[in-house]
Amino acid sequence: MAKLEFTKQEMQSMVDKLQAYFEKELHQEIGGFDTEFLLEFFSENIGAHFYNRGLQDAKAIFEAKIESIDEEIYSIEKVIES
């Protein structure tokens, strides 16, 4: 899997959310630099689990759509009498 890369806006949004979580739930302040390191850790060590689950979910949707299309094609198939 290639390294995940985010835009500056995406990274800032994630940093803000993580800092807000630390302040609200853990009553701890965490600096922006430390937060970016924490996000990088999650990305490298945990991110693949979320990425793979997303792929599995996308595959399930794709397979359901293919099955639906297959059923629709079968439903319009003409009977050939001999």
Image (cartoon, grey):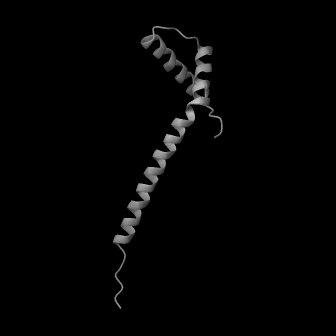
> Quarter of the image containing the C terminus?
bottom left
Q: Residue at x 37, y 71 (%)?
A: 74
Residue found at the very far bottom of the displayed protein = 82
- Left or right of 31 on screen, residue 56: left
Q: Residue at x 49, y 41 (%)?
A: 54
Q: Quadrant of residue 81?
A: bottom left
- Left or right of 79 on screen, residue 62: right
> Quarter of the image containing the N terminus?
top right
Q: Quadrant of residue 67?
A: bottom left
Where is residue 8 drawn, in percent x and y? 61, 25
Where is residue 49 drawn, in percent x and y? 53, 36
Q: Quadrant of residue 33?
A: top right
Total numbered badges shown on the rendered structure: 0
Q: Residue at x 56, y 31 (%)?
A: 46
Q: 64 above or below 3?
A: below
Towards the viewer: 9 or 67: 67
Where is residue 35 drawn, in percent x and y? 58, 17
Q: 46 above or below 61?
A: above
Towards the viewer: 44 or 17: 44
